[in-house]
Amino acid sequence: MGGDDAFDAVCQKWNWAKQGQAAMAKTVEQCKIAVEKMLLSKKVTERKTDSYEVKEDMISREFVSKKDMPLNVWSQYSQVSTFSTLYLKPLRSAGAKAKASAKVKATKLKGGKKSDDQSE
């Protein structure tokens, strides 16, 4: 396989961002639930303060499932969209990589000191 430091650096940054995004998504969901509870307790659908305004709306979407209609109708009216998707899978944890890097540096330093001691 071989290493590509620039590629690995971008993937490491991407992986870090994905982890942060997942944590933030959880926080966003917790905040939304808390606000919904506050609105429900006051029996209102909107609330405004000096800093924020929140409005709760009901949204309806119409959809149909493939199994709910005849095949010929589905074939005639269905639309397909194709797009590229990237998946990131860390093979080694960042901690393991840092530990391995530190071990290599320590080995180099020890080797360097021995050669200095031997030269004297």
Image (cartoon, rainbow, N blue to C red):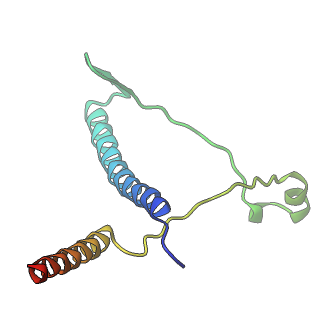
Q: Residue furthest top?
A: 50
In x, y percent, where is residue 4?
Answer: 49, 67
- Please state which of residues 83 and 75 is positioned toward the viewer in this rendering: 83
| Residue under the image location 91 percent in, 61 percent down | 72
Image location (x, y in percent) of residue 117: 9, 80
22, above or below 118, in the image: above
Residue 73 image point, x, y percent: 89, 57
Q: Is residue 44 above or below residue 89?
A: above
Q: Is residue 5 left or right of residue 114?
A: right
Q: Quadrant of the image for the N terminus?
A: bottom right
119 displayed left or right of 39: left
Q: Which quadrant does the C terminus fall into?
A: bottom left
The reply, left or right, for residue 3 in relation to residue 65 is left
The spot of residue 102 in percent (x, y) is 23, 72
At a point 42% along the width and 59% down the height, the residue shown is 9
Q: Nearer the viewer, residue 107 or 98?
A: 107
Whether 112 is drawn above or below 6: the answer is below
Q: Quadrant of residue 37?
A: top left
